[in-house]
DNA sequence: TATTGTTATACTCTATAACTATA
DNA sequence: TATAGTTATAGAGTATAACAATA
């Protein structure tokens, strides 16, 4: 039986975590968690979730894409896209339009309201990143972005 | 009604995503997703999940910690730790030990089997990172790790 | 036969709240 | 009263499979 030092159980000093923090993946998870939480805070007043923000951005940039293409871009199943598009359509941010020549699929387009919300939210997210990354210089931010981009390209579909 | 070009709907060329890829947070998410998926692949033969791998590492490094402390380290609720500790205990990787002086809490310790599995898995995860990060030089990997660490420290509990 | 969007369903992960036994 | 661990429950988020309409 171990006798615990009185200040061990209710202690506020953080535990050692060198076993985990030696890994880039663990640090990436911690950093992404911070970003994710702050993103949710920033998006709250817009009514968007992270995934609907992403979907809106893709539709704004790619008018008339199909739900299947949107699913590929978001890396989720087609069935999951239905509720995301429902959510954006109910908020009058995008619309499902008929496609001449293929009555199975929809051409998704952002509404004027959707494009305006995207532009406003884009600014909010830049401010969020300025906050989260305020400890890094402009060069360091670009370096980080470039390194992440390299990881993505190197491991994409391989 | 939009007439879709014949090669648009079933197209394999990736969509434009500059709207999202301008953000470090989005690139971080994509990179972490790749790492997470590859980690799950690597951990599969060990029987560990990412979260039980993390928990095991923390217990190995911090003998006799309580479940409440483990919850803080993992950034999840105490109730969630119960099933994680159950899982590790059932696999004979850690043990719940009595604490002299406080019969409410357990002192968690890794078993010999647990420490051996940790050592083996640590190597597997290093190999996984060598693979994922094979496009980066040693200096670039350290730069990435340092930048992520700075983001974490800058935004921790602030 | 294959594809698009849809629905129903299940599974994983996590949070919340209530409980117990101890302190 | 407060704390450690536990249990039950519910809520996200996502995947799987089956289906109707259309190609």
Image (tube, coloured by chain):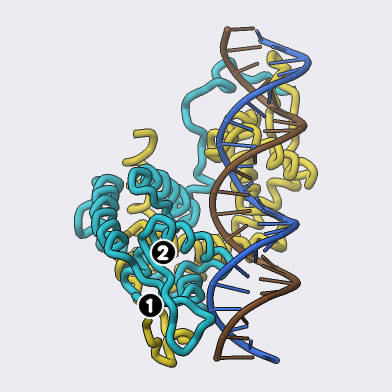
Chain colours: A cyan, B yellow, C blue, D brown
In percent of width and height, residue D2 lies at 57, 13
Q: Residue at 26% across / 45% down in the picture?
A: A131
Asked if residue A37 can be seen in this view, the reply is: yes
Q: Report the front residue among B152 and A157.
A: A157
Residue at disc 2, secondary structure: helix
Residue pictured at 45% horizontal, 51% vertical: A27
- Whole-Å distance between the Cαs marked 2 and 1? 13 Å
Residue B84 at what x, y percent from top left?
A: 68, 42
| Residue linked to disc 1 | A64
Q: Chain of mark 1?
A: A
Q: x and y percent of residue B82 in the render?
A: 70, 36
Assess whether mark 1 and mark 2 are in contact (beta carbons under 8 angstroms): no
Foreground residue among C6 and B77: C6
Q: What secondary structure is marked by label 1?
A: loop
Residue occupying the point 42% across, 61% down: A89
Location of residue A94 with respect to B15 vertically, above or below: above
For this rendering, which residue is in front, A117 or A157? Answer: A117
Q: Label for residue A158? A: none
Q: Which residue is mark 2?
A: A55
Asked if residue A59 lies left or right of residue B88, the reply is left
Q: Residues within 10 Å of mark 1 (few under 14, many from 20)?
A: many
Task: Check the picture and name the quadrant holding the N terminus of chain A.
Answer: top right
Which numbered disc flags the more N-terminal residue, 2 or 1? 2
Residue D17 figure quarter:
bottom right
The crowd level at tag 2 (other Cα within 10 Å; few <14, some 14-19, many 20+) is many
Q: Position of residue A120 (x, y in %)?
A: 24, 54
In this view, the residue farthest toward the left is A138
């Amino acid at each position: 039986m171990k006798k615990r030092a009185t200040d061990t159980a209710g202690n506020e000093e953080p535990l050692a975590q060198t076993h985990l923090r030696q890994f880039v993946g663990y640090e990436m998870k911690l950093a992404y968690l911070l970003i994710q939480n702050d993103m949710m805070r920033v998006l709250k007043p817009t009514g968007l979730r992270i995934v609907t923000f992403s979907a809106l951005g893709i539709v704004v940039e790619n008018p008339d894409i199909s739900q299947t293409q949107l699913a590929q871009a978001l890396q989720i199943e087609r069935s999951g896209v239905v509720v995301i598009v429902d959510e954006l359509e109910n908020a009058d941010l995008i619309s499902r339009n008929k496609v001449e020549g293929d009555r199975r699929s929809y051409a998704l387009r952002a509404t004027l309201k959707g494009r305006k919300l995207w532009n406003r939210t884009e600014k909010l997210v830049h401010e969020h990143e300025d906050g989260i990354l305020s400890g890094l210089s402009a060069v360091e931010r670009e370096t980080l972005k470039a390194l992440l981009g390299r990881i993505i390209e190197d491991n994409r579909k391989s």
